[in-house]
Image (cartoon, coloured by chain):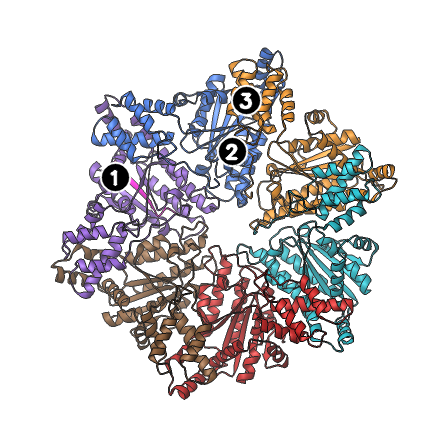
Chain colours: A brown, B purple, C blue, D orange, E cyan, F red
Amino acid sequence: MTENIEGLFAGTDEFPNPQAQQRLLALVGMEALLDRLVVNAIALLDPMVMCAWSTKVHGDVVPAVTTVADRTPLFVFAGDVGVGKTEVAEVLGQAIATRADVDVTLYPLSLTARGRGAVGEMTTLMTSAFERVSRDFARARTSTGHAASLGVLLIDEADALAQSRELTQMHHEDRAGVNALLRGIDGMRVAQLPVLTILCTNRLSALDPAVQRRAALIEVFERPSAEQRADLLRKLLLGTGMTLPDIDELTLATGPATDRDYGYTYSDLRQRLIPEIVLTAYRSDVPIAAGVAHEVLKRTPPTRPFESIRG
Amino acid sequence: MTENIEGLFAGTDEFPNPQAQQRLLALVGMEALLDRLVVNAIALLDPMVMCAWSTKVHGDVVPAVTTVADRTPLFVFAGDVGVGKTEVAEVLGQAIATRADVDVTLYPLSLTARGRGAVGEMTTLMTSAFERVSRDFARARTSTGHAASLGVLLIDEADALAQSRELTQMHHEDRAGVNALLRGIDGMRVAQLPVLTILCTNRLSALDPAVQRRAALIEVFERPSAEQRADLLRKLLLGTGMTLPDIDELTLATGPATDRDYGYTYSDLRQRLIPEIVLTAYRSDVPIAAGVAHEVLKRTPPTRPFESIRG
Amino acid sequence: MTENIEGLFAGTDEFPNPQAQQRLLALVGMEALLDRLVVNAIALLDPMVMCAWSTKVHGDVVPAVTTVADRTPLFVFAGDVGVGKTEVAEVLGQAIATRADVDVTLYPLSLTARGRGAVGEMTTLMTSAFERVSRDFARARTSTGHAASLGVLLIDEADALAQSRELTQMHHEDRAGVNALLRGIDGMRVAQLPVLTILCTNRLSALDPAVQRRAALIEVFERPSAEQRADLLRKLLLGTGMTLPDIDELTLATGPATDRDYGYTYSDLRQRLIPEIVLTAYRSDVPIAAGVAHEVLKRTPPTRPFESIRG
Amino acid sequence: MTENIEGLFAGTDEFPNPQAQQRLLALVGMEALLDRLVVNAIALLDPMVMCAWSTKVHGDVVPAVTTVADRTPLFVFAGDVGVGKTEVAEVLGQAIATRADVDVTLYPLSLTARGRGAVGEMTTLMTSAFERVSRDFARARTSTGHAASLGVLLIDEADALAQSRELTQMHHEDRAGVNALLRGIDGMRVAQLPVLTILCTNRLSALDPAVQRRAALIEVFERPSAEQRADLLRKLLLGTGMTLPDIDELTLATGPATDRDYGYTYSDLRQRLIPEIVLTAYRSDVPIAAGVAHEVLKRTPPTRPFESIRG
Amino acid sequence: MTENIEGLFAGTDEFPNPQAQQRLLALVGMEALLDRLVVNAIALLDPMVMCAWSTKVHGDVVPAVTTVADRTPLFVFAGDVGVGKTEVAEVLGQAIATRADVDVTLYPLSLTARGRGAVGEMTTLMTSAFERVSRDFARARTSTGHAASLGVLLIDEADALAQSRELTQMHHEDRAGVNALLRGIDGMRVAQLPVLTILCTNRLSALDPAVQRRAALIEVFERPSAEQRADLLRKLLLGTGMTLPDIDELTLATGPATDRDYGYTYSDLRQRLIPEIVLTAYRSDVPIAAGVAHEVLKRTPPTRPFESIRG
Amino acid sequence: MTENIEGLFAGTDEFPNPQAQQRLLALVGMEALLDRLVVNAIALLDPMVMCAWSTKVHGDVVPAVTTVADRTPLFVFAGDVGVGKTEVAEVLGQAIATRADVDVTLYPLSLTARGRGAVGEMTTLMTSAFERVSRDFARARTSTGHAASLGVLLIDEADALAQSRELTQMHHEDRAGVNALLRGIDGMRVAQLPVLTILCTNRLSALDPAVQRRAALIEVFERPSAEQRADLLRKLLLGTGMTLPDIDELTLATGPATDRDYGYTYSDLRQRLIPEIVLTAYRSDVPIAAGVAHEVLKRTPPTRPFESIRG
């Protein structure tokens, strides 16, 4: 990762690159979603592609095709913490770069990790981010409309920012943040820049309707399915003393249970359960095995879904 | 579109123009409403027209006719996001221009996309917008009362602004915005300028009573009817592999269903469902057909109606 | 109307004048109220009149007579929007002028249309208005107590201002506005100026008790009765193709109905229903008749009563 | 009344004076309360009086007597608007002056009529008022403890000020006002000044506990009883065409009724009902009589009790 | 009492002194509590005392003894107004001084009577108070750990200050006050100063948990018991015409009754009931006797318990 | 303890040291937790250790091992006041130092005891603390990744700071504090400094999800179990007149009971119950014995669990 452009982004990322490829391969069970996202990006990069295809399969450019270009290139990724929203957003560029054979640059903006909380700062931050990306891609599209590179502006942990203007008590500063976001998105759409904006949020219901309406795609991420958990656990526990039946049992045990209707998140598995299994085995100086795993499981419950204060 | 007058409007639009004509034709099922709006505009342009007509049909200028001129030329368009409020507001000028044979200028003011959220800014914005339009049309009416051109001031996404002053917690800044709106409207009515003001809002119930009382017309837009959906889908899916029975089935499937009492909005259809169908067909490199459409339909539900915080 | 005294009032009005006389005559079914208000004004103009009368009819100035002079000349007009409060307030001067043969000046102060929402501005506005009127009438009363002219200070749309100080969350600015009002009223009572203050409000229950206590008269305006609707409709539809039975039917149809316990307001009738009937007839180029009226009626429901947020 | 000391008070009043005597005599049914208040004042004026009496009747200064001097000379008058709180407070000085043969000065401070709502102003006002009164009475007590004159500091319409500090949302400014009041009261108690403070409030339950705790007497005023109404009506309707049976009937009609559990307040009777009866009779140029009274009664209901927002 | 040290305290008090001894003796039914408080003070004054005792009775310094010295010398007195919290706090120094034969100084800080409500002032006040007391006792402890004098810092009416930081809406200023309190207490504990801090509050549940946790003793004061009321009434009514059976009856009548589950507070008895009985007897110029008492009792109900807004 | 580094920390602590060893030994029933925490620290100090172990027991560095290094070294200690969170956090360094044979420095930051409540101060404090610790450990890791010393940054009483950004009403200042925390934690993770951050909070549910997600370990501390109470009571009451059966009975009596579902906290036992038993025995000059204990127990109930205002 490149360091910290003007202190605005945590560090940009250029795709393709090998680390991203590895992370991309690790995204078990998200192939279909990634595929859809990549195709969206391709349509954004070169609107002519869609026309050529339509002519090929329908004999003409059908009206439906024009609806694709009319959309705002904004994706909203919603869902609980630890369900993989940010991971997908961060490695999507790799998928696009390899499939469309273009250079992709990720601009990750974490509102909480960047802003210092000063009044108006979030607005400034937002505005600066859009200005920077717009500048970088101002000439990315050729006169024929084809773009040779793509920007992905990732706005992570956007809950604070994109709070619904419906809440009467919202402070002016917050509303200003939402407005800065809307201006940025609208501005890039009007200028037809080859830039995808991805907004990650824990609480879809709190997203301003004006933001939701513009989104070309609203994807709600769920906690990992049994298949996804199995896949992840198999990869992570590879080479340990846990047999496949052991892992299957662990897969089952990390799903919803009788006393809770939710299973483990990706974060729960990757950041708490597996590390704790490793450390527990280490502490006893024994190989990682089913016994250790179940001991740790008991004292490491999944995090509870985070409830919105507005139902 | 002309660019950005003094940074106040997103760009004005002059009618008639061919693009607007096309958009106007696309407004399926809204002919009656448009007709009513156009007649309102005509009465505003030249009060004499109504008198002449009254004399013709009633033998005299009946008292009822005077009530028309006494109204405030303010229309309120209310309804959920994606139901076509803004579209109607934006192309109404075209309908007026062609039917009344006058020049019409649209001044689109999006409060969220313009303001930067500074305290008092919305008030300033509002005031400047009214001043600008008032200046442009100060001499548009001849001494006989006939106006040769019409302005349409569109205040979109007005929810933030026109919040009811009833809410005790309303901040001074918001109230100031409402007051600026009232001043602007009252000022233009007093000066008898040939300018229509259209206010779009998601939440009619939150509109200040003083605003509602002044409105000559309050139109609540609903989600598209089966007929409107059919019409739109037929147009958009023209030339694809979808047969009319396929489209009829899709029309039905995008209406209210057993598990929800609301259907798809225009935005849902135009910005999410159809584009996604296109991209999915493209991805598989097959023509757009019923199979693809139903696959996409399953993962693309309609947006939920946005509920007002006050029931 | 005179324009805009120092930008404080929307324009003062001098009575008697012919336009006001016409508006006064149009106030169907409000004769009794107007009569009472006029008599109040006469008692305010010359306290001696009451004494003379008492001596005549009772043989002496009875104690009851003194209670009249002790009152604060403040009227509160409450009721839903569109029920005629402002209209009565605006033409009351005409009724007084003609009956008492004095000059009456109306000073209309619309808080929403005047203030710009700056903190403290409403207080300043209020204070300036009272000072201006007090100055104008400082010498209006002769040494014998008789006044040759009367001022009517109309504070319209006073909801924002006169919010109850009971609401704990009330901001200082609002409370300051109420206090400025109280000071103004008390000041004029102490100085015994021949000035009536009329306060119009949508929400009587939100009026500060200290304001209510001072009011010499609190009049709650209701939506028009069948008789009042009939009268208005007959006047407005005069000369059209609607017969008296047609109008009677329309009168009935604009009253409360099975699915709503409220009828049409004056605004509903005058600003929405009748104009729309006119425009619809014009659109079809036919005379105004029952058919058109009923078509319009269906799509033009009465406005819902505005509910206070505090029950 | 003396005018406006340094703009702080509405004008002080010196007792005894004839007007006050008349108002005092008009306070029907409040003799017992007045008597108690006068005795309190006497005890405050000269603590030795109590000792002398105790010695006389008990043979010694009993311990109970010391509790009288230990109290804070603060009276709280609570009750609905229009029930006579302010009237009693304003003429109490007359009762004290005549019975104890001392000079009494009333310092009336109306918080709403004085303050302009600026932040901190109420605190300043409060502090200034206490300082002024303290200065005036600094030397009013002789070395033997006897005081030759008494001050009555009346804090009317104190609701805004004395809001309970319990309400978490209370603003700093309000709390500051309460604290200024507490400081003022405590300061005068410590300095043993011959000054009574009377606080009038509509809402006892909202009074800060620290204020309530200090009060030597908390008197809740009720709406007038049948006897009090009869007395007032008889006085006011003296000399008119209403017979005693007519007045008795009116007395009954202005009490609680089947459709409401409250009767008319003093204000309702004195400021609205009787004046309106007078004006109605005047309008018809007939003597005041039962018919007129009942006609007016129907359209002049009593004001509803003002409910605290906190139950 | 010494006057007003630097305007910070209402006046300090030095113990022992005869007035305090009398007030101490008046504290009926609180002997056990006082005893416990005194012993706490003794342990604070000289930790060696506890060790000596432990060695005497247990043969050694048992571990339990060390827990005494580890505590924060903070007492919280909670309970309704008028139940004696402040009285106990104010005369505790006398009890300590006489029993432990040391000099004790009371520093009474009333937050409401001191602060002027300026933002940040309460914090400054708090900080200054702790600094002043810390300075006075900086050298009060000898090198052996024995202290020859003790300070009692009384923070009365602390509700405003010590509001729970749990209340999200708490303003920064209030939180700052709590933090200043915590810093002050922690600072004195670390410096091992011989200073007791006593916090009086009406609402224990609103006390910040961080304050509660530190308290060595949390004492909830109740309204006086029958025994306590009897004792107080006997003392106060000594020498009057009331017999012991009369007083017993009054004791009963001032306890909880069928229509209320609370009895009279100390304030109710001492500041309202007894003085009013005295004044009523005086008014009739008769000795204080049962008849007078019961007459007064009827019109002098006990104050209602003050309910927290948070249940 | 070293004093007060630049006024930022209450005083740092260097481990190992004998006092800490004693406190560590006193942590009854927390051995397993401490063990786990120590192992976490070891993995943080030298990631190679885990690789070596994995190779030894699994024959290779298994993928699971990499998850350990990927974690954010943040521990969250949650639970009621008085349950030992802070104690464990303060002596953990000792456990690490002795087991891993490294120097450990504790940086204790108490937000309430440090900040003065000025707006923005908490953010500054937070930022300074992270900067200071980051500077101290900037070079603590050798080029091979091994660290010779460890820092423990303890953020105690963090409730005020780490409030969930979900609460719409949160003030900007609070949000700024949360953001500063996130920045600090993320910054140290990126720089791979050998620093553990421990956050103590009373209310886990109010912790911002972005904070919770990062935590490598979230430990909820419960009130002491019967075993833990027994152990503590035995230690503290050693050498007194209480027999083991007496202590067992006290253990039982300080657990949950029929009228409450919670037992005594560590604070309740150590700071209130035992000291009060000591003082009571001292007061009677008798040895500590079962009788005294039960007498004290009756008047010293356990503190009620502190309930969050958001359920």
Task: Residue at 47% x, 27% y: name it.
Answer: C106
Type of amino acid at the residue the image marks with label 1: Leu
According to the image, label 2 marks what residue?
C129
Distance from the alpha carbon under mark 1 to that under mark 2: 44 Å
Q: Residue furthest right?
A: D59
Do tag 1 and tag 2 residues touch (Cβ < 8 Å)? no
In terms of secondary structure, what is the magenta stretch mainly?
strand
Q: Dot 1 lies on which element?
A: helix
Is label 1 on the same chain as label 2? Answer: no
Q: Nearer the viewer, mark 1 or mark 2?
A: 1
According to the image, label 1 marks what residue?
B33
Whole-percent x and y of residue A261?
Answer: 39, 63
Q: Could you classify mark 3 by the number of other residues whose Cα lies within 10 Å: few (under 14), some (14-19), or many (20 or more)?
A: many
According to the image, label 3 marks what residue?
D276
The magenta-colored residue range is B148-159
Task: Residue at 57% x, 25% y: name it.
Answer: D254
Please determine whether, in this image, residue C74 is positioned above or below residue E105.
above
